[in-house]
């Protein structure tokens, strides 16, 4: 069956208003009823790339954004890095939880996969060519504090599972700046 790629209004962007059944009659709240557009062939999310990114109804906006970034930046097959049945898939929900002048604390979502060996945190000064790798973190732990950092410095931070794979699946990379003294 051929797909008709016409566009039609399917919801409202104001105030994070969500419609229960997109693409039907929608009364958007005032004052500015901006409308999202969705592919007419799809109900909520559109296109095969979104399906490959494992975006599903109920995902938080943070998870959706991280999945799309991982999908776009993955060095491996993107669908593999976002496949929930792959124990070595990219960790999701990476967040900065605290910053001091010499440390950055992070957290992430634990994997549902019982075979996951653990996680490895990697970080670097934003202008450095190579990453510093931490010792593996337990599979039951979803927090880590990177310490011994320089004050008032930008750092890139990412995580991956500690699976022994040739081409690991990384999380998104976050940028954080330590506080000045």
Image (tube, grey):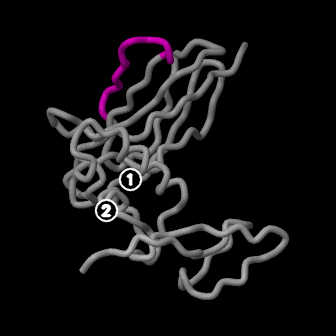
> Does 135 lie within the magenta span?
yes
Q: What quarter of the picture does the N terminus occupy? A: bottom left
**Mark 2 vs mark 1: which is more N-terminal?**
2
CB atoms at circles 2 and 1 under 8 Å apart?
no
| Residue 83 in the image, given as x and y percentages of width and height | 26, 57
Residue 105 included in the magenta stretch of the image: no
Seen in the image, is 87 located left or right of residue 39? left
Residue at image location 14% in from the left, 33% down from the top = 166
Where is mark 1, residue-wise? 110
Looking at the image, the residue that sits furthest to the right is 31
* Residue pictured at 35% horizontal, 47% vertical: 71
Vertical arrangement, residue 26 with respect to residue 33, above or below: below
24 to 45, vertically: above or below: below
Query: What whole-number distance in Å separates the C-alpha atoms at marks 2 and 1?
Result: 26 Å
Depth check, front residue: 128 or 107: 128
In the displayed structure, 6 sits above or below 148; it is: below
**In which image quadrant can residue 20 be found?**
bottom right
User: In which image quadrant can residue 36 be found?
Assistant: bottom right
Residue 74 x %, y % = 31, 40
Q: Which quarter of the image is occupied by the C terminus?
A: top right
Taking the spot 46% from the left edge, 36% from the top edge, the residue there is 144
Magenta residues (range): 125-136
Judge left or right: residue 91 versus residue 145.
Answer: left
Which residue was labeled with disc 2? 48
Q: Callout 2: helix, strand or loop? A: helix
Answer with left or right where residue 24 lies relative to residue 120: right
Secondary structure of residue under mark 1: loop
Q: Position of residue 30 (x, y in %)?
A: 82, 74
Q: How many residues crowd around disc 2 within 10 Å: few (fewer than 14), some, or many (20 or more)?
A: few
61 and 113: which is toward the camera:
61
Q: Which residue is drawn at the image coordinates 62% and 23% (left, top)?
A: 177
């Amino acid at each position: 069956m051929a797909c008709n790629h016409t566009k039609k209004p399917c919801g409202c962007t104001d105030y994070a208003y969500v419609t229960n059944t997109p693409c039907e009659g929608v009364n958007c709240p005032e004052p500015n009823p901006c409308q999202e557009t969705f592919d007419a062939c799809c109900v909520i999310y559109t296109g095969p790339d979104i399906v490959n990114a494992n975006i599903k109804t109920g995902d938080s906006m943070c998870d959706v954004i991280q999945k799309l970034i991982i999908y776009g930046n993955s060095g491996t097959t993107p669908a593999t890095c976002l496949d929930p049945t792959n124990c070595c898939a990219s960790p999701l929900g990476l967040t900065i939880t605290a910053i001091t002048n010499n440390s950055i604390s992070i957290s992430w979502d634990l994997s549902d996969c019982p075979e996951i060996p653990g996680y490895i945190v990697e970080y670097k000064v934003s202008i450095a060519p190579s990453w510093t790798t931490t010792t593996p973190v337990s599979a039951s732990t979803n927090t880590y504090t990177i310490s011994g950092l320089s004050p008032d410095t930008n750092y890139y931070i990412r995580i991956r599972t500690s699976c022994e794979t040739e081409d690991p699946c990384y999380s998104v990379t976050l940028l954080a700046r330590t506080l000045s003294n």
